Image (cartoon, rainbow, N blue to C red):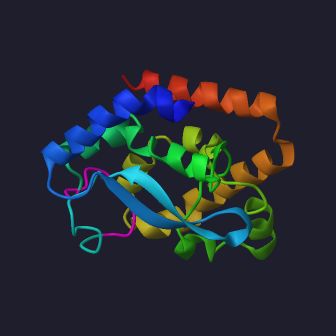
Amino acid sequence: MALLALAPLMLLIAFWVRADSRGPVLFRQDRVGLNGRLFGIYKFRTMRVGSLGNGPSITVGADLRITRAGTVLRKYKLDELPQFINVLLGDMSVVGPRPEVPHYVAMYPPETRERVLSVRPGITDLASIEFRNESELLGNAADPDDFYVRVVLPKKLDYCLQYVATRNLLLDLSIIFRTVATIFARS
């Protein structure tokens, strides 16, 4: 139902991404999902074509690889809307631990990995709300990747473990409401 309701907005965004820079409208990246299974996560493309290998593996601050449209899409989390396709395909849920790339999942402590990957990953979670300004936070770090691994990732995993231990419909609805409120608070 979300895909149907969001279809007009997603169509406008697709035209904007296409008009703003050359390349495909969607970006697909391997992420680790339920029980450690790899799947392709969909997002609206926010970076220039061919720029993924020309910079840090994580996006920080005012990254020059990000397109004009991409800056706005990332600010309001609109680049995440195609993940409702992943929900439809069964790879993701609306709420659940955000799926990470294999590189970072390999750094999870074994027991944590097993618990976090025991539930379907989500479009939003508690960590997404807490770290809504992650790019800016990492942009202020001397070594963004090291800061992510040492400081941000452990806190995100704590939120993931908290969610897995206490998940229920009321919590999911609360996270959805808080996510929407956080996005609108930015405007």
For the stretch drawn in magenta, what is the main secondary structure? Answer: loop
Q: Give the residue drawn at x 14%, y 43%.
A: 19
Most extreme residue toward the right, as rendered?
165
Quadrant in which the N terminus appears = top right
Q: Give the residue drawn at x 48%, y 70%.
A: 146
Q: Is residue 64 magenta?
A: yes
Where is residue 37 shown, x and y percent of the image?
Answer: 66, 71
* Depicted 36 relative to depicted 148: above or below: below
Q: Is residue 128 magenta?
A: no
Side of 17 where 58 appears, left or right: right
> Is there any visible trace of residue 140 in the rendered image?
no
Where is residue 102 shown, x and y percent of the image?
Answer: 56, 73
Where is residue 165 shown, x and y percent of the image?
Answer: 85, 48
> Is there any visible trace of residue 31 in the rendered image?
yes
Where on the picture, by quarter, is residue 9?
A: top left
* Depicted 21 relative to depicted 52: above or below: above
* Depicted 28 relative to depicted 25: above or below: below
Quadrant in which the C terminus appears = top left
Side of 92 where 111 appears, left or right: right
Q: Magenta region: which residues?
A: 56-65
Q: Give the residue drawn at x 29%, y 37%.
A: 13
Side of 33 where 142 appears, left or right: left
